[in-house]
Image (cartoon, helix red, strand yellow):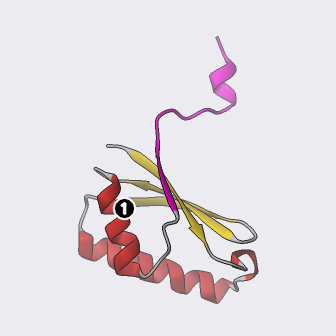
Amino acid sequence: MPKYVVEREIPGAGKLSAEELRSLSEISCSVLKNMGPQIQWVQSYVTDDKIYCIYIAPNEEVVLEHARQGGFPANEINEVFTILDPTSAEV
C-alpha cells in the first residue's frame, strides 16, 4: 500500500505543549478508528511551524478525508516512492 508524507502548516507547532500534542494525537486516532484499517498513521515530526505526518493509505483521497474529519490542515500530500537511509549506501 502507498505511503504518504503530509505537510501540515501549524504556526507555533514546535511550541505546542505535551498536552496539546496528546490531544491532536487522540483526535487523529479517533478518526482513524472510525475510518477503519484502510489508513494507518505511522508517525509525525514536529518542527517550528509544521507537522509532517507519515501515513499508509490506498490513495491520497483517504488521507485528505482523515484531515477533513480531524479538522487538520493538509497543505501538501506527497506519495513516497523510495526510502533512503544509511544502508542505501551499502553495496
Query: Looking at the image, which residue sits at the far front?
Result: 75
Nearer to the camera, 35 or 74 = 74
**Mark 1 closeness class: few <14, some 14–19, many ≥20 residues within 10 Å:** many
> Secondary structure under badge 1?
helix
The range drawn in magenta is 76-91
Q: Is residue 16 magenta?
A: no
Counting every numbered tag in the picture gives: 1
Residue 76 shown left or right of residue 63 in the figure: right
For disc 1, the marked residue is 63
Residue 24: image location, x then y, percent: 52, 81
Q: Quadrant of the N terminus?
A: top left
Asked where in the image residue 17 lies, by quadrant, the reply is bottom right
Q: Name the residue at 76% across, 81% down.
A: 15
> Dividing the picture into quarters, in which one does residue 89 lie?
top right
Percent across and percent down for residue 46 are 67, 67
In the image: residue 91, left or right of residue 71: right
- Give how far across and how far down residue 57 sits, in percent: 33, 53
Vertical comparison of 73 with 18: above or below: above
Which residue is more in the foreground, 70 or 78? 78
Q: Position of residue 61 (x, y in %)?
A: 30, 59
| Residue type at the position of mark 1 | Val
Residue drawn where x is 52% and y is 65% of the image = 75
* Image-based side of 3 in relation to 25, left or right: left
Above or below: residue 19 compared with residue 29: below
